[in-house]
Amino acid sequence: MENKVAIVTGASRGIGRAIALELARSGCRIAFNYLSSDDQANALSKEIKELGAEAVGYKVDIKNYAAVNEMVRNIKTSFGSIDFLVNNAGINRDTSLLTMTEEDWDEVIGINLKGVFNCTRSAIYTMMKQKKGRIINITSISGLIGQRGQVNYASSKAGIIGFTKSLAREIAPLNMTVNALALGYIDTDMTSHLSEMQKKKAYEKIPLGRFGSVQDVARITAFLLSDAAAYITGQVIAVDGGIAM
Ligand code: NAP
């Protein structure tokens, strides 16, 4: 992993932050992205630099194709190559379909699914030219088994699974891989609004009986980007404590 250039989207907080740190510890040079959390982004840059690694944060809305394209072009110019892309940024706007607005739908699909297209489309040319590159897409078990109140979110995450498998077939001849991680409940801001009662109900559905940690996700991401995972592509690996088995 030494000196590999990794782009991690949505890294100011939560899972993306843990992935960026894990990859930095493995020797990667980190280009990370976020939407609005300047203080947290600055803190992450500082923490990565203290580890002796390189870090540059890019404040860009991943649903904006032109802005993402410019971000990726700047990363290529500054870092010289793009080895890894981790499409992690995502949001939820949970509500029943009956009360879901067009904006709830467009925003979730725009960030979670079109964002993956925007970032991957922008980075793929460089990776194909280099004839090397690894991509990890963060999806959810909602995209596999559905979840009440998440018609928009589950659609975006199921879309990412189709995207991953199709792209895996396209880029395999160039020895490039793309895999998806289907996450269950992970302890981050996204799950922090759940009441104790909701958490207790969730634990009952999780065979391992706990929420995952951001480290649980970061470690498998680093493994899938490493040479040890060179023969794994087009897979959707559930990191969910066993819920979706
Ligand atoms: P989080 O703590 O809410 O963090 C979301 C990150 O995405 C933040 O860094 C945020 O930046 C960034 N972001 C949001 N919208 C963006 C946009 N339009 N452009 C660029 N960056 C944007 O979320 P998380 O729990 O770490 O989730 C990370 C990924 O895991 C998501 O794809 C989520 O769907 C997936 N996932 C999470 C869980 C879970 O239980 N936590 C379960 C299944 C799947 P700012 O800080 O600037 O807003």
Image (cartoon, rainbow, N blue to C red):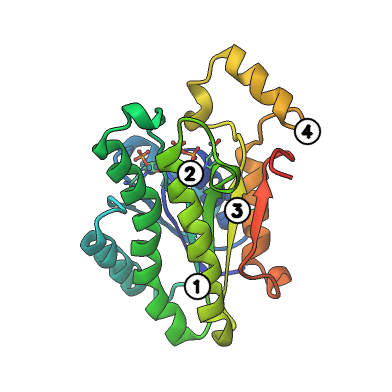
- Along the line of sight, the residue nearer the viewer: 107 or 97: 97
Residue under numbered circle 4: 207
Q: Is residue 26 left or right of residue 3?
A: right
Residue found 60% across the figure and 40% down from its top? 214
Which of the numbered marks, if any, corresponds to residue 89? none
Q: Quadrant of ligand 1?
A: top left
Do the CB atoms of the residues marked 1 and 3 lie less than 8 Å apart? no
Q: Residue furthest front?
A: 98
- Residue 68: image quadrant is bottom left
Which of the numbered marks, if any, corresponds to residue 154? 2
Residue found 35% across the figure and 43% down from its top? 108
- Residue 153: image quadrant is top left
Residue under numbered circle 1: 167
Q: Residue furthest left?
A: 66
Q: Amino acid at mark 2?
A: Ala
Residue found 27% across the figure and 33% down from its top? 101
Label 4 Cα crowd, 10 Å radius (few <14 / some 14-19 / many 20+):
few
Q: Is residue 244 left or right of residue 33?
A: right
Residue 103: image x %, image y %?
A: 25, 38
Between the residue at mark 4 and the residue at mark 1, the CA separation in whole angstroms equals 32 Å
Q: Amino acid at mark 4?
A: Pro
Residue 5: image x %, image y %?
A: 48, 68
- Along the line of sight, the residue nearer the viewer: 135 or 102: 102
Which of the numbered marks, if any, corresponds to residue 181? 3
Query: Which quadrant of the figure contains the N terminus?
Result: bottom right
Secondary element at tag 1: helix
Sooner in the amino-acid sequence: mark 2 or mark 1:
2
Sooner in the amino-acid sequence: mark 1 or mark 3:
1
Residue found 45% across the figure and 78% down from its top? 127
Q: Is mark 3 within 8 Å of ligand 1?
A: no
Sooner in the amino-acid sequence: mark 4 or mark 2:
2
Q: Is mark 2 within 8 Å of ligand 1?
A: no
